[in-house]
C-alpha cells in the first residue's frame, strides 16, 4: 500500500462506538451506522478517510478492546491473548454526520461476499450482517490515502466494490472544477448509485452480473483502465481494490507515461484467498 505520511494523523486516536442500526443498503453492501460520545471529536477529512476497525469475533462471548493509540499500536495489539483479541480490518468512512443535538453518526459499508450456501464470508462481513443496536466496536483513525497534487491536469480513479466507499467520498470531496474519469466495477446493477462527482469527471459503471462463481472482481475495471491513455504526465491516478487491479493498473498507467509518484494504488485483498493484504 502506498502511503503519504503527511496525510496520516500525527498521533492516531482510538474512537469507541456502538451500533445504532444496520441494513442491506444494496445487494452487495451491508451498511452499519454507529454512534458514540467519542465521535463528536472525530475530524472527518472527506475523500477516502479510513480507519482500523476492531469488532468482536464470532467465537467470542464479549468485546474486549484495550486502549491503543499512536503509530506503534500493532505490537501492543498482537500482545493481546489471541482468544480475546478482537478482529481487525481496514475500512473507509462511508458517511459522517454531525447532528443538531451535538451527537455524531458514522456509516460504514461492508462488501458482502457469500459462500455456495449464500452465507456471508469474512469475519467483518459476518459481524456486520449479524450486528444489533448496542453492539460495541472501536476505530483507530488513519487519515487519507488519496493525495492529488495541486498541479494535476486530470484525475483517474479505478476500483471494484471494496473500493466503492472510498470512491464515493473522493467524488464528493473533489474540487468542482476537477476533470478526469472514474471507473467503478460492481457485482450487480443494484449496486450502482449516484456519485456526487464534478461535472468534468466522467463516471463509468461496470456491472459484472456474472454467473461464474470463479469470476475475479476487478478484472473488468482493469480492462477498462488499460484502454485509458493519460492526457499528459501531470495526471493523478488512484487505483484500489483487488490486488491484480491495483498492481496491473499502476503498471499500465506508468507505462502510458504517468510518473509512479503520481499514482496511488492499494490492493486490499487477493482473490485467490479472499484474505486481507496486511497494511
Image (cartoon, rainbow, N blue to C red):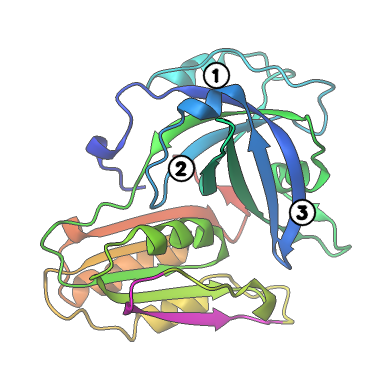
Determine whether the residue tagged by mark 2 lies in a helix, strand or loop: strand
From the viewer's perspective, is the residue at label 1 or at label 3 nearer? 3
Residue positioned 55% across, 30% down in the render: 102
Q: Is residue 164 above or below residue 137?
A: below
Whole-Å distance between the Cαs marked 1 and 2? Answer: 19 Å
Check if residue 123 falls in the magenta segment. Answer: no
Q: Residue at x 12, y 68 (%)?
A: 234
Magenta-drawn segment: 197-210
Outermost residue to the right: 117
Query: Where is residue 54 drawn, in percent x and y?
Result: 62, 30
The residue singled out by tag 3 in the image is 23
Q: Nearer the viewer, residue 168 or 233?
A: 168
Asked if residue 161 shows in the view, the reply is yes
Q: Which mark is residue 44?
A: none
Residue carrying label 1: 77
Name the residue that disc number 2 marks: 50
Amino acid at each position: 500500500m502506498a502511503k503519504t505520511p503527511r496525510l496520516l494523523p500525527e498521533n492516531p486516536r482510538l474512537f469507541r462506538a456502538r451500533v445504532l442500526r444496520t441494513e442491506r443498503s444494496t445487494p452487495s453492501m451491508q451498511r452499519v451506522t454507529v454512534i458514540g460520545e467519542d465521535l463528536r471529536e472525530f475530524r472527518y477529512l472527506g475523500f477516502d478517510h479510513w480507519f482500523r476497525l476492531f469488532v468482536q469475533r464470532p467465537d467470542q462471548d464479549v468485546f474486549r478492546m484495550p486502549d491503543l493509540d499512536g503509530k506503534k499500536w500493532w505490537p501492543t495489539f498482537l500482545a493481546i491473548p489471541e482468544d480475546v483479541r478482537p478482529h481487525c480490518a481496514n475500512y473507509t468512512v462511508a458517511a459522517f454526520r454531525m447532528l443538531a443535538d451535538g451527537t455524531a453518526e458514522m456509516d460504514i459499508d461492508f462488501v458482502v461476499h457469500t459462500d455456495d450456501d449464500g452465507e456471508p464470508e469474512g469475519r467483518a462481513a459476518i459481524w456486520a450482517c449479524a450486528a444489533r443496536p448496542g453492539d460495541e466496536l472501536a476505530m483507530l483513525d488513519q487519515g487519507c490515502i488519496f493525495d492529488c497534487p495541486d498541479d494535476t491536469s486530470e484525475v483517474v480513479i479505478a476500483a471494484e466494490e471494496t473500493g466503492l466507499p472510498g470512491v464515493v467520498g473522493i467524488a464528493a470531496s473533489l474540487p468542482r472544477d476537477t476533470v478526469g474519469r472514474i471507473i467503478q466495477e460492481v457485482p450487480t446493477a443494484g449496486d450502482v448509485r449516484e456519485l456526487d462527482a464534478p461535472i468534468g469527471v466522467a463516471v463509468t459503471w461496470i456491472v459484472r452480473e456474472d454467473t461464474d462463481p470463479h469470476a475475479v472482481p476487478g478484472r473488468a475495471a482493469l480492462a477498462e483502465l488499460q484502454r485509458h491513455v493519460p492526457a499528459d504526465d501531470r495526471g493523478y491516478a488512484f487505483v484500489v481494490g483487488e490486488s491484480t487491479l491495483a498492481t496491473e493498473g499502476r503498471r499500465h498507467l506508468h507505462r502510458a507515461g504517468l510518473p509512479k509518484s503520481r499514482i496511488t494504488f492499494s490492493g486490499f485483498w487477493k482473490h485467490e484467498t479472499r484474505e486481507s493484504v496486511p497494511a
